[in-house]
Image (cartoon, helix red, strand yellow):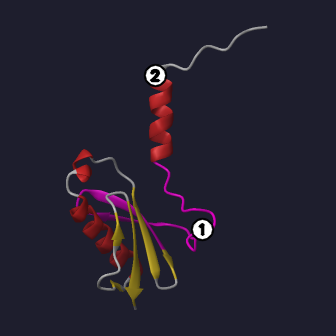
């Protein structure tokens, strides 16, 4: 019986980046099945999904600066939600991190 070779570090790294690039919402969330709208804000690209009065934004690009300035990236996600929906983000509802954010919309 032939043995399969052990995975190489490059293969593991490639798989990690492929999984990190996924922007699908949880299958049981309100955003499941909602097609994303791509929005660029500054140097960031977001996939934005709108479900009723809620918005969900996932940053699609790699940016190492995001770990040092999370608040700026959450604010960018809010702008992306406003551009995608045509509504404003309700004050005090924008929550998230440098990669994934959610908010309530005021339309």
Q: Which residues are magenta?
A: 21-49
The answer to the question of whether label 1 and label 2 lie on touching residues, with beta carbons closer than 8 A, is no
Quarter where residue 57 is shown: bottom left
The quadrant the C terminus occupies is bottom left
* Mark 1 and mark 2: Cα distance apart in space: 33 Å
Q: What residue is at 25 percent from the left and 52 percent from the top?
A: 66
33, above or below 104, in the image? above
- Residue at screen point 22% across, 49% down: 65
Disc 2 is placed on an element classified as: helix
Q: Which residue is mark 2?
A: 9
Mark 1 or 2, nearer chain start: 2
Residue 60: assigned label: none
The correct choice, above or below, for 63 with respect to 55 in the image is: above
Residue at figure coordinates x 39%, y 75% from the top left: 84
Q: Secondary structure at mark 1?
A: loop
User: Mark 1 highlights which residue?
Assistant: 32
Q: Quadrant of residue 85?
A: bottom left
Q: How many marks?
A: 2
Please state the horizontal and vertical placement of residue 9, each as a whole percent of the image.
Answer: 46, 22
């Amino acid at each position: 019986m032939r043995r399969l070779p052990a995975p190489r570090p490059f293969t593991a790294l490639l798989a990690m980046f492929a999984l990190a690039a996924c922007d699908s919402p949880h299958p049981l969330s309100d955003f499941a099945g909602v097609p994303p709208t791509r929005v660029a804000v500054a140097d960031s690209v977001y996939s934005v999904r709108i479900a009723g009065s809620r918005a969900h934004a996932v940053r699609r690009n790699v940016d190492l600066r995001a770990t040092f300035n999370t608040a700026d990236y959450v604010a960018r996600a809010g702008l992306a939600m406003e551009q995608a929906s045509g509504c404003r983000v309700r004050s005090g509802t924008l929550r998230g991190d440098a990669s994934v954010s959610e908010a309530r919309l005021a339309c």
